[in-house]
Amino acid sequence: MSLIKTLLSSIIVLFATQSLALSPEDYLGSNDLEDLKKEYQLMKETVNNPDLIWLPLFTPDGRPMIMTFSQTKEWVKKNILEEWDGNLREYNEQYIAVLSEAVKASRATKQKIKREILPAMASRIKELEAEQDNQTPSTNGQNSQGNVNSQGNVQGNADAQSTPEERNYYDRCPKKNPSSTGTFSIRFYQPGKKNNYRECTYRSSKFSSPLAREVPYLDGKKDGTVFRYEYIEDVDFYYLEEKASYSKGKLNGIRDVYHFNRDTKKLYHIFETNYADGKKHGYHIRFWDNGNTEKEEKYHMGNVLSRKIYNREGGMTQCYKWDSFGNTTSCMPKK
């Protein structure tokens, strides 16, 4: 198989795998009712627009890249031309194949958004509206409150007298530890599903107990978006350190890692890596602390296809490509 077919087949596989990695949790981060309503309405209008193509690709926040059909055709051409060896027949075949897969992936992504994400957003909007009206929030039409047991686990029940600190946060971990027992690891179970739960771990601090880690489980395996937070006490700075998508216990989607620089007092993006079935698949990009790309790699199911190294100013210093036999060639531009 030629290099162009190898690279473009990886794009096709990525369309299929990442459209499945989308999670409702990615769209429920805001607790602002008006912001959530606006995003819900915009997404509803966009997903029903037949001219817009939703590609599950490498955006920084893990959400689909949205383009018009004309823009999608230009994007496909650009990817093919980057590796084109002059074979016109192969070019036409790959153009049709990738464009068809892009449309198919968009259709699957839109269906998933309509089936899972929009209903989850609508449910969250109702909860926030209920909270504004001083009503008890509910999940999936059921009372989702619970009591913290001696192990710090929250068990769902129908007790309408539960306090706000004892609610079942199965859909999203609270930012501060809700346990009155001093427990720092709490599982919030889905009502009636003992293997479906969200594990919330909190940091011990003399000032507060902020959320340190949030892990959703489905059938006992990580499934959804995992969040890891860091809190720097001496400067009172709390930030998202890692965000990673899982499916059936394996990394499946984008993993982002951030770092706080004590010298500059700034937060910067360290790297983002795309995964499929637990293996690197797609782009792995590492950044300098000034925001410029330091390293850019392409993978196909764990196998590296290309690697580019840049200096802090953005100039390329190294460029290598691998063929299907593992042979390496330089791809540095000729001077």
Image (cartoon, grey):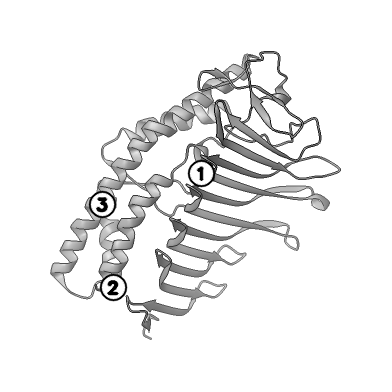
Q: Earlier in the sequence, mark 3 or mark 2?
A: 2
Name which residue type carries label 3: Glu
Name which residue type carries label 1: Asp
Q: Do the CB atoms of the residues marked 1 and 2 lie less than 8 Å apart?
A: no
According to the picture, the residue beneath numbered tag 2 turns out to be: 3
Q: Earlier in the sequence, mark 1 or mark 3?
A: 3
Residue 72 in the image: above or below residue 162: below
Image mark for residue 18: none
Neighbour tally class for label 2: few under 14, some 14-19, many 20 plus, Cα within 10 Å: some
Q: In the current view of this chain or complex, which residue is farthest to the right?
A: 206
Q: In the current view of this chain or complex, which residue is farthest to the bottom?
A: 335
Residue 157 in the image: above or below residue 64: above
Where in the figure is residue 183, as x and y percent of width and height? 77, 37
- Side of 104 relative to 306 (left or right): left
Number of marks in picture: 3
Name which residue type carries label 2: Leu
> Which residue corresponds to the image point at 52% horizontal and 59% vertical from the top-left?
272
Closer to us: 158 or 299: 158
Where in the figure is residue 190, as x and y percent of width and height? 56, 29
Closer to us: 179 or 93: 179
Q: Earlier in the sequence, mark 1 or mark 2?
A: 2
Where in the figure is residue 151, as x and y percent of width and height? 74, 35
According to the picture, the residue beneath numbered tag 1 turns out to be: 223
Q: Is residue 219 visible in the rendered structure shown here? A: yes
| Quadrant the C terminus occupies | bottom left
> Which residue corresponds to the image point at 19% horizontal and 75% vertical from the top-left?
86
> Mark 1 or mark 3: which is in front?
1
Q: Is residue 68 visible in the rendered structure shown here? A: no
